[in-house]
Image (tube, rainbow, N blue to C red):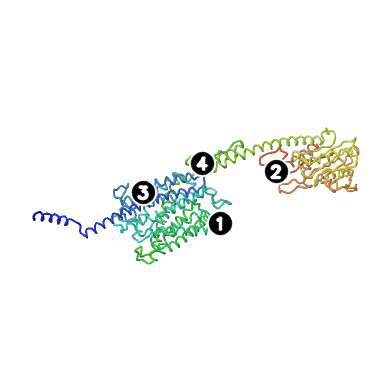
Amino acid sequence: MTEADTLSLINELQSKIDKLPTKGTLKALEFRLDAILQANLDTFWLLVCAILVFLMQSGFMCLESGLSRNKNSINVALKNVTDFGIAVVTFWAFGFALMYGTSVMGLFGNRFYFFTTHVAGYQTYFVFQAMFVATAATIISGAVAERLRFFSYVIITFVTSGFLYPIVGHWAWAFNFDNPTEKFGWLGKMGYIDFAGASVVHSVGGWVALSVLLIIGNRTGRFREGAKKTFQGSNTPMAALGALILWFGWFGFNGGANGAMDLKVPLILINTFLSASFGLIFSSIMGVLIMKKPEPLFMITGPLAGLVSITAGCAHVNPSEAILIGSIGGIVSGSTIVLLDKFKIDDVVSAIPVHLASGIWGTLAVAIFGNFEMMGIEKTRFEQLIIQIIGIVSIGGFCFFSSFVIFKLINLVFPLRVGKIEEELGLNISEHNASTDTHELLEVLTKQAKSEDYSMRAPQDPFTDSGIIGTQYNVLMDRLEQSEKQKNKWKNRVSNEIKLAMNVQKRLMPNRDLSNYPIYGLNIPAREISGDFYDFYLHDDQVYFTLSDVSGKGVNAGMVMAKAITLFKIYARQKFKPNEILLEMNNDLIQTNPPGTFITSIVGSYNLTTDIIELANAGHQPALLKQGDDFTEFGSSSTPLAVMKQKNLDVYKLETFKLNGGRIYCYTDGFSECLDENNEEIGIEGVKNLIKTHSNSSLKKELENATEEIRQKSLKKEYQEKGIKENNDILDDDLTIIGIGK
C-alpha cells in the first residue's frame, strides 16, 4: 500500500468518526425517546382508564335495574344504553367546545365544535372526557326511575350533557391545551380543586336529579300511610353486581383524571379502594343502627359513597386521610337516605345521597385534609375552604335552578311523567311494549280474578322464576279445581238436604185455612231454616196456640223446633192446660236437646165461646193485650224449656183473662231487638208503638205491615245499600209474630 493510499484511508476513517454523535447528542436523543415513550404510555393509560369508566355504564345499568321494580327494569336498562349515546353525540357536537374551547370570560368555551382533530393528545382527552359526561347524565336515570317518560329522559340527558355539565366543567377544569398550567375557567383561576369530579361530575348529576324529582313527584303509593319504607327492587344481587362494577371502573375514573401514568397513580388507586371500603363499613353500620339489620341499600350504596367522597382529593391526601374521608362519606350518604325519607323525596337508587351529598362532602374534604404542598397551593386551609364552598354553591345553584326552570317549562307543554295507569302497568309495557315473564304471569292472574275463569293457567317456563311459580300455581289450581268439584258435589247434596228440611219445616207450620178464625201468624226466617216457630191447634171451640224461639239458627235449631212443635200438637190434642203443656214439653226436650240449646216459649188457649184466654210463659217476652190504645202485658216469664227438669207445675204460671174486643200479640226477639235510627233496640215499647202505627181492621194486614217494617229495619246495611230486599239470609234474626182477636 502506497503512502497516498494510506492517507486516503485515514481521511475516510476520520470522516466517518466525525459523523458519529457526541455524548451530548446521545443524551438528547435518549431524552427525546423517553419523552415519546412517556407520552405513548400516558396516552395508553388514559385510554385504558376511559374504557374502565365506560365499563361503569354497565355498572349503573345493573345497579339501577336491580333496585327498580321488575315492571320497570327494562326501561331503566334502556335509558342507561340510550343516555350514553346521546351524551357522547351532544358532547362531540358542542359539549366539548363549551367545556374546553377558547374561554369567553371564564364562563364557557367557544372552540372545537363538532370535534375533529388529528392531534392524538386532543383525541385521547376527548374520549376520556366523553366517558365523564355520560356518567354525569346517567346518575339522573336511577333517581327518577319508574315514573319518567322515556323521551323526557332523552331531553334531560341532552340538556345535562350538552349544556349543564360542559359549562360547569369549563368553570373548574378548562385549560390551555398549549399550556396546560394556564386555567381558563373562573373557578379554576380562583384555585378551586376537584381532581376527578366529585362536584363537577357527581353533584351535577345529583342537583339535576333533585330538581327533576321535585317536578315529577314520588312514585304512586311510595309514601302512603301504612306503606313499607321502600319498594322492593327486582334483583338485589344484580344491584350488588352493579356496585362492584362501578367500584372496579372507578380506578379508571380517578386514575385517569391524573392524565398521565406516573408515581401519583398508585397513591390515587390506594386512596380509591380504601375510601370505598370504609364507606361500605360505616354505611352498613348505619343501616344496622337504623333498620336493626344489615340493610341491602346501605350496604350497596356505602362503597359508592366512599368512592364519590374521595374523588375530589384522591391525589392529594394520604391513605389514612382517605380512610377518614370514606368513612364520613358513608355516614353522610346513610344520613341523607334517612333525610330524603323524612322529607318524602322518592329517590329510587339513592343517587342524591351517594352522588350529591357525598360529592359535596368530598369537595370540602380537599380543603380539610389535602396536602397543599402536593397541590402547589399557598393559601390557608380556611381560604381554600371558602373557595371550595364557592364552587359547591355556584355549581349547585346553576345546575339546580337552571334545570328546574328548564324542565318545569317543558313539563307545562310536554308532561315529563307518565300517567297513573301507565305507571301502574309498568314502564316496560307502557313505554316499550316489552313484556316480562313476571308481567305475563301477573296478566293471567289479573284476568282470572276479573273473569273468575279458574280454568285459565299461568305460563310455564322452567328457566325463569316466574315460570317456575306459574308451574306450581297451575298444579295448585288443578288441585283446587278437583277440590272445588268435590266441594260443589257436597254443596249440592247439602243444598238439597236443606231444601228438603225447609219443606218439612213449612209443613210443620200451620198450613190449613184459618181465615174463618180470628187468628193469624207470620214467620220470616233469617236463614233457610228458622229457629222460630208458631202453631195453632183447633179443638172444638178452643184454639191452642204457641210461639217459640229456639236458641241458635240453622239446621240444628230447625231439628229442635221440629220436635218441640210436634210435642205441642200432642199435648194440645189432649187438652192439657198451657202450663201443663210447657211442663211436659220441657221434661221431654231436656232428654234429647243438644247441650246448650234452649227454647223460650209462650203457650196459650183461646175459648171462642167465652172469649177467655189462658196463657203460660217459659222465658219468653210477655204477650201484649191491646184494648183500644192501651196495652197490658201478660205471661210472667219463667225458666226457658230444656234447661233443667221441672217437677212443679207452678214453675209455669197460668194467667187467665178476657179479650173483650181486643187483640193479643205474641212475638219473638227479632221484633223487640230491632235497632232504631239511634242504633238502639226498640224494646217492648217499640213493639207497642209499631202495632199502634199499623192498627187495621184486618188482623192479617196489621201483622204483615208491622212485620215488613221490622224486616226493612233488620236488613243488613251492606244489603240495604245494594237495594237487596228479597233475601231471607240477610236478616239479623228470625221474625215471627201471631195475633188473636177480631
Q: Earlier along the polypeptide chain: callout 3 or callout 4?
A: 3
Q: Is residue 492 above or below residue 34?
A: above
Disc 1/disc 3 C-alpha distance (Å): 44 Å
Task: Name the residue that disc number 1 marks.
Answer: 293
Task: Name the residue that disc number 2 marks.
Answer: 716
Circle 2 packing at 10 Å, graded few (<14), some (14-19), many (20+), is: some
Q: Amino acid at mark 1?
A: Lys
Please state which of the two labelled residues, at mark 3 or mark 4, is closer to the viewer.
Answer: 4
Residue shown at the point (62%, 40%) measured from the top left: 476
Q: Percent x, y for residue 621?
A: 81, 46
Disc 2/disc 3 C-alpha distance (Å): 70 Å
The part of the image, by quadrant, that contains residue 381 is: bottom left
Circle 4 packing at 10 Å, graded few (<14), some (14-19), many (20+), is: some
Q: Amino acid at mark 2?
A: Lys
Q: Earlier along the polypeptide chain: callout 1 or callout 2?
A: 1
Q: Is residue 171 above or below residue 610?
A: below
Please state which of the two labelled residues, at mark 1 or mark 2, is closer to the viewer.
Answer: 1
Q: Amino acid at mark 4?
A: Thr
Q: Percent x, y for residue 268?
A: 39, 59
Q: Earlier along the polypeptide chain: callout 1 or callout 4?
A: 1
Verify CB contact (< 8 Å) between mark 3 and mark 4: no
Q: Is residue 513 left or right of residue 256?
A: right
Q: Percent x, y for residue 117?
A: 29, 48
The secondary structure type at the circle numbered 2 is loop
Q: Identify the mark at residue 436; answer none if there is no mark.
A: 4
**Viewer-nearest residue: 73 or 505:** 73
